Image (cartoon, rainbow, N blue to C red):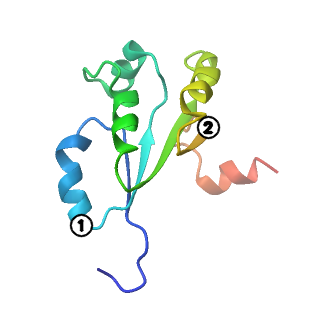
Amino acid sequence: KLEGLKTIAVTTNGINLARLLPRLKEAGLNAINISLDTLVPAKFEFIVRRKGTGLGKKVILRLLKCPLFLQVNCVVMRGFNEDELLGFVDFTKDLPLDVRFIEYMPFDGKQSCFEILHGME
């Protein structure tokens, strides 16, 4: 309830969202970023380290029924999910949501953000 605050968003893989969504909406949540790096159930479980076969797609389809801004973030990783990009496009092309494909950038903690950005020049 801060003056001027227009958006309250959360980024989630959706694992606990069904349980938390009512309280989050009461708090003013109006946007959700779903992190979904794969459509393959076994890969999804590997990434989140929990059972949840097909959970990512199910969460997205259920959230489309809610009056929330919905966005899907997919980190593209060579050798892991780059072969799924067309599947993501096919799954989401007719859905009213935004999809962002984000480049995986390994960071070993030994460089500062300034050094990383400076190296891009």
Residue labelled with disc 1: 27
Helix, strand or loop under label 2: strand
Evaluate whether residue 54 shows in this view: yes
For image coordinates 37% across by 61% down, the residue present is 30
The span from disc 1 to disc 2 (Cα, nearest Å) is 29 Å
Residue 59 x/y as whole percent: 34, 35
Residue 50 x/y as whole percent: 26, 23
Label 1 or label 2, whichever lies nearer to me, is 1
For image coordinates 52% across by 41% down, the residue present is 73
Q: Amino acid at mark 2?
A: Phe
Q: Quick one: which residue is furthest to the bottom in this view?
A: 3
Residue 109 x/y as whole percent: 51, 42
Q: Looking at the rendering, in which quadrant would you find the N terminus?
A: bottom left
Q: Is residue 1 left or right of residue 112?
A: left
Helix, strand or loop under label 1: loop
Q: Residues within 10 Å of mark 2 (few under 14, many from 20)?
A: few
Q: Amino acid at mark 1?
A: Ala
Evaluate whether residue 108 shows in this view: no
Q: Quadrant of residue 12?
A: top left
Query: Do residues under tags 1 and 2 come within 8 Å of each other at their CB atoms?
Result: no
User: In the figure, 4 relative to 49: above or below?
Assistant: below
User: In the figure, 34 relative to 45: above or below?
Assistant: below
Q: Is residue 80 left or right of residue 9?
A: right
Residues 25 and 118: in front is 25
Residue 66 x/y as whole percent: 34, 50
Disc on res. 101: 2
Q: Is residue 54 left or right of residue 110?
A: left
Q: Residues within 10 Å of mark 1 (few under 14, many from 20)?
A: few
For image coordinates 57% across by 41% down, the residue present is 99
